[in-house]
Image (spheres, helix red, strand yellow):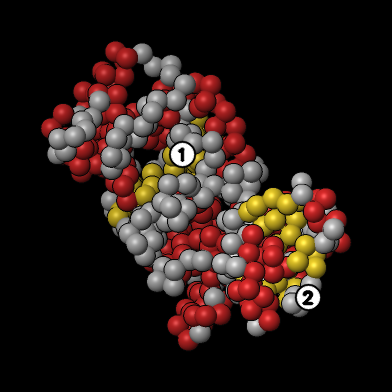
């Protein structure tokens, strides 16, 4: 199947300056780029969509450029932001770039060849051009009227509580200059990004046309929203990003985040974020509609993404850890994974001396507030709804150090979901 038909099936085309570019991409040989500003310590799940778009283009014989924003990152893109980003210093930018370069290398093929990927840094030209040269070469081609008319800018100007600094206002010119340099230096003919980048992308295409006389194209992908209207790729609180860095978001946490994807957006996620065939995706659509409780589609989504971001073994381990949360296999988990799967559970401490003498399960249940009293705790035990390390316990059970996981932890559970971690000091 041609790339154009695949992108249309997956719903990955939101806007395009000229639909003819889709046929050119299907034929191969086009150089295209996406920019990634290093404003965070890692790329996150939201960045993965354009990264995979570059990968799809490369597999069809096109050359992808991943442009690290060492220059634009010093400014910060104001597009549809409620307030100005905190300005990062050069040291922070460089530290972030180290991680981002390594992450991009996992998804694109940089081996020499006609479609070999390139990783460039716009600091190479944005931090070396003089202000007067920039204003003469770029600024003269755009009117303030044009720039204010861009929706991403107008949304800030229309608000009384927050304005737009000249620093931010200049961002679209910097990004336009990126496109010009890549077009002249690397024969780049396509810039891609999320739909919130449309204004910046069209400015760049226009600059290329005015300076070189060539046609430059732009393409945006839809912004992916959760069922509640918030951007996909944020934690349930909506504040913390789901990172591609394992030290910030573990493979298990990433797997669980995807496993808990809302049924409403899961078909879209399968299309956007996986390389499953159309037939496989349609089959998962059917499974989701007929038996949503099995979460087969979400499991496939989680496995595919964790495998791409980390590796196959990490995906399998994350799946096993999730299953162990409610099975006796919890004893087989390493300490780090155990702490990950109970990270959201309340916890309390217990002295080792006290445990040496033996602690009644019902008493511990009440102390951990999984029951309002010892009497209620005994009833829960008698009804078969109390577990220690996922093993159902009897009313007369007394716990000692032999029950500890990693010689330090007890996982108490009442029913299916009420869990408590006891840490023995």
Q: Looking at the image, can residue 70 be seen?
A: yes
The answer to which of 335 and 59 lies nearer the viewer is 335
Above or below, comparing residue 183 to residue 231 in the picture:
above
Front-lying residue, 3 or 132: 132
Q: Residues within 10 Å of mark 1 (few under 14, many from 20)?
A: many
Cα separation, mark 2 vs mark 1, equals 60 Å
Where residue 176 sits, quadrant-wise, is: top left
Residue drawn at x 36%, y 65% as measured from the top left: 227
Q: Secondary structure at mark 2?
A: loop
- In this figure, which residue is indicated by the disc labeled 2? 396
At x 79% / y 72%, what residue is drawn?
Answer: 397
- Residue at point 60%, 74% (across, down): 376
Front of the two marks 2 and 1 = 2
Residue 103 horizontal side relative to residue 57, left or right: right
Residue 341 x %, y %: 65, 59
**How many labels were placed on the picture?**
2
Q: Splitting the image into 4 quarters, where does residue 111 fall?
A: top right
Residue 284: x, y in percent? 52, 78
The mark found on residue 36 in the picture is 1
Q: Is residue 281 above or below residue 255?
A: below
Q: Residue furthest bottom?
A: 290
Marks 2 and 1, the one that precedes in the sequence: 1
Front one among 92 and 57: 92
Q: Secondary structure at mark 1?
A: strand
Q: Position of residue 311 (x, y in %)?
A: 68, 56
Q: Is residue 334 left or right of residue 19?
A: right
């Amino acid at each position: 199947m041609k790339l154009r038909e695949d992108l249309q099936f997956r719903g990955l085309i939101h806007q395009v300056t000229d639909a003819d570019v889709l046929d050119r991409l299907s034929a191969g040989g086009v150089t295209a780029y996406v920019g990634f500003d290093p404003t965070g310590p890692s790329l996150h799940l939201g960045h993965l969509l354009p990264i995979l778009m570059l990968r799809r283009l490369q597999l069809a014989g096109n050359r992808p450029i991943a442009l690290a924003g060492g220059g634009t990152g010093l400014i910060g893109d104001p597009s549809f932001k409620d307030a100005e980003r905190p300005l990062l210093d050069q040291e922070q930018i460089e530290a972030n770039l180290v991680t981002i370069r390594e992450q991009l290398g996992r998804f694109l093929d940089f081996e020499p060849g006609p479609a070999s990927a390139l990783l460039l840094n716009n600091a190479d030209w944005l931090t070396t051009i003089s202000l007067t040269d920039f204003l003469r070469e770029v600024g003269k081609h755009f009117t303030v009227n044009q720039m204010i008319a861009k929706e991403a800018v107008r949304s800030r100007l229309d608000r009384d509580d927050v304005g737009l600094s000249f620093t931010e206002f200049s961002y679209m010119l910097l990004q336009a200059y990126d496109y010009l340099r890549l077009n002249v230096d690397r024969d780049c003919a396509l810039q891609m990004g999320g739909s919130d980048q449309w204004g910046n992308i069209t400015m760049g295409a226009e600059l290329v046309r005015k300076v070189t006389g060539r046609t430059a194209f732009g393409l945006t992908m839809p912004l992916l929203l959760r069922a509640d209207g918030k951007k996909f790729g944020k934690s349930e609180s909506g504040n913390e990003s789901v990172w591609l860095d394992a030290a910030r978001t573990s493979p298990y946490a990433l797997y669980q985040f995807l496993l808990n994807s809302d049924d409403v957006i899961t078909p879209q996620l399968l299309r956007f974020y996986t390389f499953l065939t159309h037939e496989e995706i349609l089959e998962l659509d059917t499974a989701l509609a007929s038996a949503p409780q099995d979460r087969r589609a979400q499991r496939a989504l989680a496995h595919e993404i964790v495998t791409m971001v980390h590796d196959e073994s990490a995906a399998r381990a994350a799946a096993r850890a999730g299953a162990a949360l409610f099975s006796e296999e919890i004893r087989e988990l390493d300490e780090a994974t155990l702490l990950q799967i109970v990270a959201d559970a309340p916890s309390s401490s217990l002295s080792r001396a006290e445990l040496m003498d033996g602690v009644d399960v019902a008493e511990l249940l009440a102390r951990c507030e999984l029951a309002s009293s010892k009497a209620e705790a005994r009833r829960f035990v008698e009804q078969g709804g109390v577990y220690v390390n996922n093993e159902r316990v009897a009313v007369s059970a007394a716990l000692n150090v032999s029950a500890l996981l990693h010689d330090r932890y007890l996982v108490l559970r009442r029913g299916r979901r009420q869990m408590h971690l006891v840490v023995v000091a």
